[in-house]
Structure formats: C-alpha cells, structure tokens
Amino acid sequence: ATTEEALRRALLEGELVLHYQPVLDLVTGRTASVEALVRWDRPGHGLVPPDAFIPAAERSDLICDLGRWALAAALEQLTQWDEGEEFAGLGMAVNISGRHLASRHLLDDVTDALSASGVEPGRLTLEITETVLVDEPSALDQLRALRELGVRIAIDDFGTGYTSIGQLPRLPVDVLKIDRSFVASPGAGHADLVRLVISAAHSFDLGVVAEGIEENDQLHRLVADSCDSGQGFLFARPSAPADLALPRARAT
Ligand code: G
Ligand code: G
Ligand code: MN
Ligand code: NA
C-alpha cells in the first residue's frame, strides 16, 4: 500500500494520536496553552513523527480529513481537561495545512468542532505557515472568516518564508510564532532580528510566541525583549496526555 492508503486506513482505525507541547506565558511564567502535534501510532513501526507522513497527506485532500480529525480530537481533549483542575481552561493551538485552508472546508470543520465540543472559540488558535499567505490570495478571505468565528490565527515558523514585517498590518492574524532557527542560534544577527520582529509585532497588536527555546540564555534574552510567550524543550517536549505536565518558567 502507498503511504497515503495506509494513512487513510490509519485515520479510520484510530491510529493517529495527538501529543501536546506546553506554551508558556512569559509574563506570568505559567503554561497558558498547548500545541497539538500529530503522531501515527503505527503497528510494527512505533510512533511515527509527522514529517514522515504529513507531506504524503498534503498531496491529496487526505490532509483535510486529517485536519478535521485533529481539530475535533484537540477540542474534545480540552473539554476532558476542563472537567479536572490541573489542565482546566487551557488554550489549544492546532496546525492547519495550507491545502486545508484553500479547500474552503476548513471553516465548516472549525465550526463543527467548536459546536461539538462547546469550546469557546477564543481558546482555539489555528497555526498556518506563512508561505500559505503568499501562495494563495483567497486564503486571506478564509482567514478573515475564521477570525469572525472568534478563533485566533497564528503565523507558524515566521521568518522562514516570504512574509515581510511591512505586510503584517494587512494580514488577518493575531499571533506570530518566531521560527526556532532564529531563537536557537545567537549568531548571524539573529538576536537583533528577534528583537526587531517582537517590537514590530507589538506595534501591530500581535502577540509573539518564540519556538524552540532550549536554553536559559535564550529565555532570558526573550524576556528582556518583551516576548509574550515561549515554547521549547527547556520547558517541555511534546508528550501524550498521560505524560503531560504543565511547567512553569523560573523567575527571570
Ligand atoms: O511534532 P513535530 O515537531 O515533529 O512536528 C513536525 C511538523 O509537523 C511541524 O511543522 C508541525 O507543524 C507539523 N504538524 C504536526 N502536527 C500537525 C497536524 O496536526 N497537522 C499539520 N498539518 N501539521 C502538523
Ligand atoms: O512547525 P511547528 O512549529 O508546528 O513544529 C513544531 C515542532 O518543533 C515539533 O516537531 C516539536 O517537536 C519541535 N520542537 C518544539 N520545541 C523544540 C525545541 O525546543 N527544539 C527543537 N529542536 N525542536 C522543538
Ligand atoms: Mn506549529
Ligand atoms: Na513552527
């Protein structure tokens, strides 16, 4: 079977699972939300990372089925967490493929997942990579419609694509996620670039999440630069719900 056929079956058989990585509010030091990251628990293969199957899914509308499943599963997880104490009230970020956005099914899929779960729309953030915004002009209309539902839109991996800071005020987005390649390497003027992106984002009323924080030095620099939120192995790796703990940042 092709990867696509195997994946289609996996989706039906419930072999896809979501892991969750905490995103911390760098002002309060608390975990405010989690990012859902799909894995394929494939019999005989172990836990397969998304890089190994998302590209195959994106070659057809299978990525829309996967996205619809991820939205429903992530919001269902939130409602389960809301019943307890430790994980109640978290926000949820879900990665959405450009193809799904362009398919025009996304609006219905988000609406359905919100109404099935009863989750308040403002708790859901959709992460879209910035290349989508350039490749597909109608994507902007879709994003506007999604924001009218009350969900938040984040540009994922910001800095790796073609979006310039000058475009930000025209984009229907709420949050920038600075790609981990800029956070990780302090060389090549990256520290200055990160500071510039944070201040530009704030001047356009966008929130900023730094991805891939692995070291205390990076955290301290980001806090000094007024970065709003952070995510990375320093705090927590993505993990299955059963292993999830909500870290706090040390006082900075
Ligand atoms: O979990 P990991 O860091 O290996 O994720 C690798 C890539 O897979 C990331 O770029 C992430 O955005 C993408 N990814 C993870 N989960 C999903 C998902 O549910 N849908 C889509 N479209 N991409 C995902
Ligand atoms: O493209 P996206 O940002 O959705 O990808 C998230 C990916 O980044 C996941 O595969 C996750 O495992 C990975 N990731 C999260 N935090 C870190 C980190 O601190 N360092 C590294 N190297 N990868 C990270
Ligand atoms: Mn992401
Ligand atoms: Na990212």
Image (cartoon, helix red, strand yellow):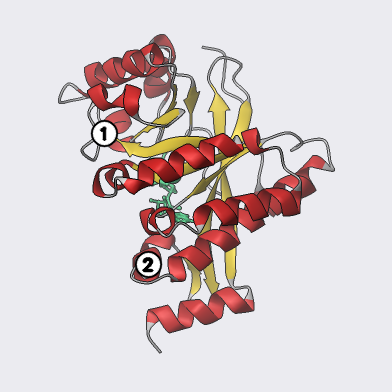
In this rendering, position of residue 184 left or right of residue 223: left
First in sequence: mark 1 or mark 2?
2
Q: Quadrant of ligand 3?
A: top left
Secondary structure under tag 1 reads loop
Amino acid at dot 1: Gly
Q: Compared to 8, does 129 lie above or below?
A: above
Asked whether 110 or 222 is in front, the reply is 110
In this rendering, position of residue 109 left or right of residue 208: right
Q: How many marks?
A: 2
Name the residue that disc number 2 marks: 52
What residue is shown at x 56% (from left), y 14% (from top)? Answer: 27
What residue is shown at x 66% (from left), y 55% (from top)? Answer: 112
Residue 98: % across, % down: 37, 53
What residue is shown at x 36% (from left), y 65% (from top)? Answer: 58
Asked whether 44 or 35 is in front, the reply is 35
Q: Compared to 138, does 70 lie above or below?
A: below
- Numbered circle sitting on residue 159: 1
Residue 51: % across, % down: 37, 61
Q: Quadrant of residue 219?
A: top left
Residue 226: % across, % down: 43, 12
Mark 2 neighbour density, 10 Å: few (under 14) some (14–19) many (20 or more): few
